[in-house]
Image (tube, rainbow, N blue to C red):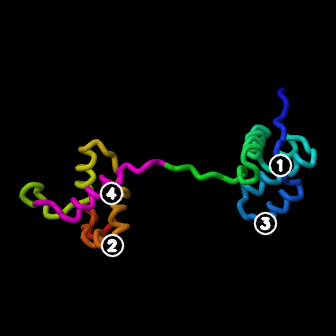
Amino acid sequence: MGQPIELTRLEHSASDLRGLAARTSEGGWVRRLLAIALLLDGHSREAAAVANGMTRQTLRDWVHRFNADGVTGLRSRTSPGRPPALNETRREELKIIVLEGPDPERHRVVRWPLRRDRRAMVGDGVRADHGQMAAPAWNDPAAAATLPSEEGSGGRSGF
């Protein structure tokens, strides 16, 4: 078994970390602070990990983050998430299409159902679900007022 990763940041004592943990309400951060505090007190990695509901390997990963970024490195990071299927230019184009409405002779409809909007965008190689197609209307009350209900919704309105 290899050598444990040493704590290189010693600007906080174990009691400092416990005090910070007592003042925060973010559960994951509290557990990580307390685990590092136990290490500073001289407890084994296994004991510190088990006492805080994690594996020794997970604690090792948090020690790396603590050494690199200090106590803020122990906070949970948010992931960026999936990028939107429609960029700003395409969203503006879609908004114009929806607000102007269809040409009855050319499109053979008198209003745009969201399914048809979605098909038009997918035809250009963009995948978009109902929520993404309706999202511009949610952000613009004028656009929302012009949107018809979904085809076949049985008289229910909107989204």
Identify which residue is drawn at 71% across, 50% down. 73
> Which residue appears farthest toward the right when viewing the image?
42
Please tell me whether mark 1 or mark 4 is closer to you in this view: 1
Quarter of the rendering occupied by the N terminus: top right
Residue 90 seen in render: yes
Kindly identify which residue carries mark 4.
Answer: 133
> Which residue appears farthest toward the left when viewing the image?
105
Distance between the alpha carbons at the discs numbered 1 and 3: 16 Å
- Comes first in the chain, label 2 or label 4: 4
- Comes first in the chain, label 1 or label 3: 3
Viewer-side residue, 92 vs 124: 92
Distance between the alpha carbons at the discs numbered 4 and 3: 43 Å
- Comes first in the chain, label 2 or label 3: 3
What secondary structure is found at the residue carrying circle 2?
Answer: helix
Kindly identify which residue carries mark 3.
Answer: 23
Identify which residue is drawn at 41% across, 51% down. 84
Q: Position of residue 149 (x, y in %)?
A: 27, 66
Distance between the alpha carbons at the discs numbered 2 and 3: 42 Å
